[in-house]
Amino acid sequence: MGEYERQRKGLYYYRRTPPVVSQGNAVLCWASALESWLEVTINELGEKKGSWSGDDAKAHGFDGLNWERKHLNLKNMKSLWGDQTNENESLKPDGIRVIALDIGMGGDVIKPIDLDKNYLRTKLTTFSCLYILYFSNVMYHAVVAYGIDTTTEELLVMDPAQGVGLTRRTLSFFKAPNRVNQTMFVGWAVSN
């Protein structure tokens, strides 16, 4: 379980540290980050099954749809969601929606300007580690956020890019000129 820790006159909030899962192939960040997110989420919250319900599920047509959160590797993901990827195995635009519904991941589609320390602290304290898709340079990139330093406004992330692993990203990184007008997806584990 996450906890607060005072350091450097600041306040950190963090969940369990996710395992580093390197993507190898440049377009498989979605799968590597998802494998890491599933591992850390299941270690914290356990494997779960449920079904979507409520006003949002009814309004968007997935009321009653079953989901299951379990350990998956790249081979499992390709088998389950191969139809959600392009020929080069990159994720199609609607792919994350399908995957999120299948594994019990809620989320917000936001603009980078809305990604601030209060939003992130609230999501991390309320839910679990966060699965974040953001626009990189020419395509989207996925990371797992597991903490925030509210003093330096740095997000602690597991970045699956080759040779990166556990690192920090300033919130201003997500608001760079090449990203500021692009949407982001911030996902978390649902509990029902």
Image (spheres, rainbow, N blue to C red):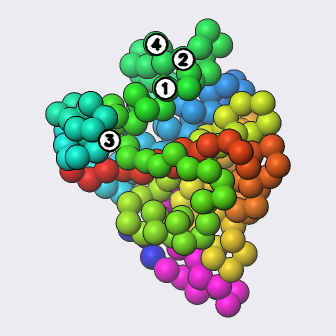
Residue projecting furthest to the bottom: 9
Where is residue 29 drawn, in percent x and y? 63, 33
Question: Distance between the Cα atoms at labels 1 and 2?
Answer: 7 Å
Q: Are marks 3 and 2 in contact (CB under 8 Å)?
A: no
- Residue at 47%, 14% (x, y): give it: 82
Q: Identify whether 182 is placed above or below 10.
A: above
Q: Tell me which corner region of the image, top left, top right, bottom left or bottom right, holds residue 115.
A: bottom right
The answer to whether any part of residue 67 appears in the image is no
Q: Amino acid at mark 3?
A: Gly
Where is residue 17 drawn, in percent x and y? 53, 59
On residue 104, the disc is 3
Q: Are marks 1 and 2 in contact (CB under 8 Å)?
A: yes
Residue under pointer 2? 85
Precedes in sequence: disc 3 or disc 4: 4
Q: Identify whether 65 is placed above or below 114.
A: above
In this view of the protein, which residue sits in the foreground, 123 or 43?
123
Q: Amino acid at mark 4?
A: Asp
Q: Amino acid at mark 1?
A: Gly
Q: Residues within 10 Å of mark 2 (few under 14, many from 20)?
A: some
Where is residue 128 drawn, in percent x and y? 41, 58
Within the magenta stretch, is there residue 8? yes
Question: Distance between the Cα atoms at labels 3 and 1?
Answer: 14 Å
Where is residue 6 drawn, in percent x and y? 58, 86
Q: Identify whether 71 is placed above or below 157.
A: above
Q: Are marks 2 and 4 in contact (CB under 8 Å)?
A: yes
Callout 1: helix, strand or loop? helix
Start and end of the magenta stretch? 4-21
In this view of the protein, which residue sits in the foreground, 52 or 188?
52
Residue under pointer 1? 95
